[in-house]
Every structure is written in C-alpha cells, then in structure tokens.
Image (cartoon, rainbow, N blue to C red):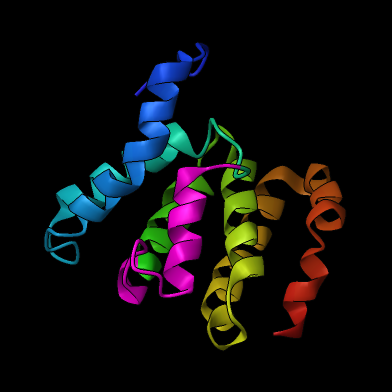
Amino acid sequence: MFPKDKQAQSTVSHAIKEYLPNFIRGIFKLDYRKEKVVEKALKEVLLNYVCIHPSSNNPISKLCIDSVHNREEGLKWDELQFLLDVMKNSVLNSNTNPMNGFELIFEIFKATPLSRTAVIANILLRSTFEIYMKQGSTFIPVFKKFNVQSLLIF
C-alpha cells in the first residue's frame, strides 16, 4: 500500500479507510478455504495496514466488531475466524509492530458478546504468550495496559 516511513495524504487515507472493509468483504466472495491467494491478499492488507495504524478508528476493527455483533456490514462468523487466524499467524508474529495487531484483537474481544468470547480469547491468549516469548520483559507493561488478566477468566 504505502511505504511505512511515509504518511498517506488525508484524501487517500480516507479512501482507504472507507473502501478497505469492502475490499476484505470482496475477497471473502472467493473460496477462501481453498484459494491460497485469499490468505496471501489478507496477509498483505493486514501487515500493511494493521502494523502501521493503531486500532482506534481502524476500519478493520470496525469490520470485525460489526461481524461479532452479526451486523449486516460485517463478515460471517467463519470468515471472521479465518481473518483472525490470518492476523494471528501474520501480524502478531511479524517483526514490524505486533502490538497494533494485539490491540486490534483485544478491542474486538472487549466488544464481543459473551457467547462468542471463547474463540477470540483463545486467539488473544495464544498471541499474548507468543509475543511475550519473543519480546520478553518488554511486553509486561502491555499486561497492565490492556488488562490481559481478564482473559484468564474464560
């Protein structure tokens, strides 16, 4: 999309913000379970967008939150799970900025109805431990910032 060291102009940034959810929904029209190109496209979008932009006011966050609430503009539940798996495997394991991806999944978790929190809590807990194993003690302040201990209830 854009080089990581450059800021997108506000018009272009607004266009991306507006049309990125439509692009992701369009990708899911393909046979995403069999077509590796879908996973690759999602990985590229997530790496280039989530790692650069925090989850606050993030269109991918809004799309996912709409999905967990079964809103019309959201994804189907299995599509959301696929997207979160791609995010877990690519963004959270990347060397660029896994914290934005972690923050995004945590925001989705907080907005998720109780009946669906187990799936997202599972992804968050695994991601928490994987990031901790990579970053060590530098990750401890994140526990305090995001109150990750609340996940252990599930």
- Residue 100 shown in magenta: no
- The furthest residue to the bottom: 115
Residue 72 coordinates in the image, percent (x, y): 34, 68
Q: Which residue is drawn at 52% across and 12% down?
A: 5
Q: Which of 80 and 12 is in front in this view?
A: 12
Q: Residue at x 82, y 57 (%)?
A: 143
Using the image as rendered, state which of residue 129 and residue 57 is in the foreground.
57
The quarter holding residue 112 reads bottom right
Q: Give the magenta-colored segment's residue range.
A: 57-79
Locate residue 28, reporting x and y percent: 21, 59
Above or below 101: residue 152 = below
Q: Is residue 106 visible?
A: yes
Quadrant of res 63: bottom left
Between residue 97 and residue 77, name the one nearer to us: 77
Q: Where is residue 130 in the image (x, y as percent from the top left)?
A: 62, 57
Query: Which quadrant: the N terminus?
Result: top left
Count the numbered circles shown: 0
Whether residue 127 is visible here, answered yes or no, is no
- Measured as percent of width and height from the top left, residue 104 is found at 58, 52
Quadrant (top left/top right/bottom left/bottom right) for the C terminus: bottom right
